[in-house]
Image (cartoon, rainbow, N blue to C red):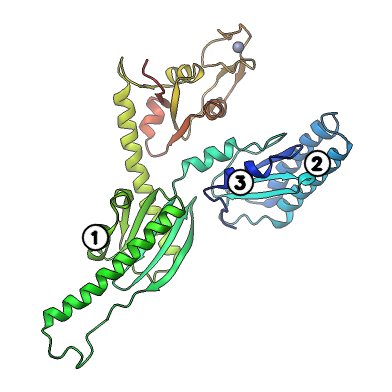
Amino acid sequence: MATNIKPDTIRQILNLSANADYIVSFYLNVDGGKYPRKQELEVDLKALLRSAAKEWLGSDKLNRSQKKFLETDFEKISNFVQFELDRRSIKGLVIFSSSGSDIWQVLTLPVTVPSFIKIGKEPYIKHLAAVIDQFKRYCTVVIDRKKARIFSVYLGGIEEYLGFFEDDVPAKVKEGEWANLREKKIANHIEDHVQRHLKNVADKTKIFFKREKCDRLIIGGRKDIVSKFISLLQPFLRECVSGEFLAQPALPLSKILEYSLDCEREAEKREEAVLLKKLINSEKPEGAGVVGLEPTIEALTTGQVQSLIISDSLKFSGGVCRQCHFISTYLETCPVCGRQLEHHDDLAEELIQQAINNNCRLNYIKYNPEFAKKYQAGAFLRFAV
Ligand SMILES: [Zn+2]
């Protein structure tokens, strides 16, 4: 089972549930690393469904027929996880279900999600959106002098868009046909064909790249062919090239994915370094950024954050006000409403949730342990302070 997330998945889910009375948003961590045996996973599944049933079936939040439908939702979810879920190459599962409105959407992710269940008028998509937003969509083109293949690489999976396509490039000069031409002219003729083939692939790449809303381009091939190909790309695509690898179009899919992911990792590392440099430099008295956990929390709770930058291993304890969502690592009472702050061992999830609610962009820092140790978090602000 691979991921089935598409660029417009979120929009589809929102559209789909426009007329539902209620919708179940079910998130489950199905990571084989955490749950080597499926039975262990089923324990979590049952606990989640039990507590949701207690809250919703035993209350007057829904009427009789809605409760019947909700029971069906729980049953369908339970059956899916127990009998249909194939955990190979997925770590997170998200299901949106509302039997009364014929809604049943299963989304599989190659990354983990926290397990929870929410029931409400609208689908709970914020976690999903944040997960999706972290991932760039890559287009990989593998090319040689006469053949090419085009792929999309997304959320750790690969899909082939255009299988082997072959342009009419003469492999070698036929006997007699060019007999009275000079060698150079023959070579030029072949090079013309190669050039036309590369141009054709460049055009197809452009169409695919735009249609699939890709963010980056990776190119596999012999070095000289790759650089010729890049020179034929439109300037906007040339700007998007973020990796190259040595390969032939006949390479197995698994290898193409492996090399693409290597390029992706390297590109992420480079981008992360640039981002952090920009962030650290922006932290001047007149700058438009902050670094460090406390200043970041402060900027977030006062609505100033445009993009939040956090270590992907962020964990911190502190208090949160249930009334106005004020977070602090050291205060006992809320300075806004005076309530006692509720203590939690880990408020990272709360911080992320607030950023998502404020429409902030999220950037997870994965490759810089120094940042995690020294700053933990930072932010670019909507306006300079
Ligand atoms: Zn408060």
Q: Position of residue 79 (x, y in %)?
A: 76, 52
Q: Residue at x 34, y 34 (%)?
A: 275
What residue does disc 1 label?
A: 227
- Secondary structure of residue under mark 3: helix
Earlier-in-chain disc, 3 versus 1: 3
Viewed as shown, does residue 67 lie left or right of 264? right
Mark 1 and mark 2 residues within 8 Å of each other at the beta carbon: no
Query: Tag 1: residue type?
Result: Ser
Q: Are marks 3 and 1 in contact (CB under 8 Å)?
A: no
What kind of residue is marked 2? Leu
Which quadrant of the view contains residue 344? top right
Q: Give the percent coordinates (x, y) of residue 328.
A: 53, 15
Per the image, the residue denoted by label 2 is: 70
What residue is shown with label 3?
12
- What type is the residue that disc 3 sits on? Gln
How much space separates mark 1 and mark 2, taking CA atoms? 57 Å
**Label 1: which secondary element:** helix
> In the picture, residue 332 is in which quadrant?
top right
* Mark 3 to mark 2 CA distance (whole Å): 22 Å
Where the C terminus falls, by quadrant?
Answer: top left
Pointer 1 or 2: first along the chain? 2
Let me know if residue 74 appears in the view.
no
Q: Is residue 129 above or below residue 306?
A: below
Instruction: Please report whichever mark, 3 or 2, sits nearer to the chain's N-terminal start.
Output: 3
Q: Quarter holding the N terminus?
A: bottom right
